Image (cartoon, rainbow, N blue to C red):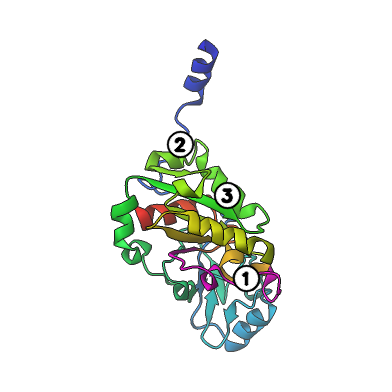
Amino acid sequence: MIKTLQNRFEQGYRTSRYPKEPIQLPERYRGRPQIVPDAPAELAAHCAAACPQEAIDADSKRIDMGRCVFCGTCERLSEGRFVKFTQDFEIATAQKEHLITDGSLPALADHAKQHFKKLFGRSLQLRQVSAAGCNSCEADLNVLATPFFDLARFGINFVASPRHADAIVVTGPISRNMKTALLQTYEAVPAPKAVIAVGSCTLSGGPFRGSPEITEGLDQLLPVDLFIPGCPPHPLTNLHAFLSFFK
C-alpha cells in the first residue's frame, strides 16, 4: 500500500482538464478539413478523382466527412491549395447533411436535442455495438475509460447490458451478419433512447461502400441522433460529441 501511494504521488495528476482548458493535439493530426474557396477548378477535380472514398464534390467544392477517411490524399495532391486539414477535433454533428461541408460546421450544442440534456445530463449509460468493425473505432472509445480522459467523471459510462443503457454507440460497417444483433440490441434499450454513429464505416460504409454485405449508413436502419466522423474518430472527438450533445 505504501508503494502504491508513493507511486501515485510521484505520478501526479494525469487527467486532462479538457473541456475546461483547450488541448493541443500533435501537428500530424488531421481534423476538420478546410476547403480553399478560390482553388482552381482543375485542382478540385484532380483531388476529387483521386479521393478513394469519392468524398469530394469538385463542382460545389465540398467534402463529405461522413465518407472521408482523413487519409490526406487531397491535401498532399493540392499541397494545401484546395484542402487543408486543421487540428480541430470538434467535428461531430446532429444532422448527417451537416457533414457535407466546405469546412464550416454548426455548433453541435446548438443543434443538440434539449430533452436529451434534461434526461441524461447527469447520468448517461452507453452500450457499444461493434457491427463488424476493425476495432479502431472501438479502441478509441475504450480509451475514454483511461485516467487521461476519465469519461466517468462526467457521469458517462459504458455498460454491459442494453437494458441498462440510455443509448447505443454503433461502430463498424454493419455487416449482414450483424444487422439482426444490432436491431435486437436497439430494441432492448428502454425508451427514451438515443443512437450514436461513430466512424466513417457506420456513417457511410467507409472503405466497404458498394458491397452487398454491409449497410451504407446506420441511418438507413435506425434513427440516428449523433454523427461522429473519422477513421477512427479521435477520443477527444468522441468526448466532445458526448459532452456537447448530452451535457
Q: Tell me residue 128's x, y (percent).
A: 54, 51
**In the rendering, at what x and y percent does residue 244 appear?**
37, 56
Which amino acid is tagged 3?
Asp
Quarter of the image for residue 27 reads bottom right
Q: Residue at x 38, y 43 (%)?
A: 154
**For residue 88, above or below residue 25:** below
Q: Is residue 221 magenta?
A: yes
Residue 15 is tagged as 2
Tell me the distance, in whole angstroms, between the alpha carbons under discs 2 and 3: 16 Å
Residue that appears at 61% across and 62% down: 180
- Mark before the other along the chain sequence, 2 or 3: 2
In the image, 96: left or right of 230? left
Amino acid at dot 1: Thr
In the rendered structure, which segment of residues is drawn in magenta? 208-227
Labels 2 & 3 near each other (Cβ < 8 A): no
Residue holding disc 1: 215
Give the residue number, with chain letter if any, for mark 3: 140
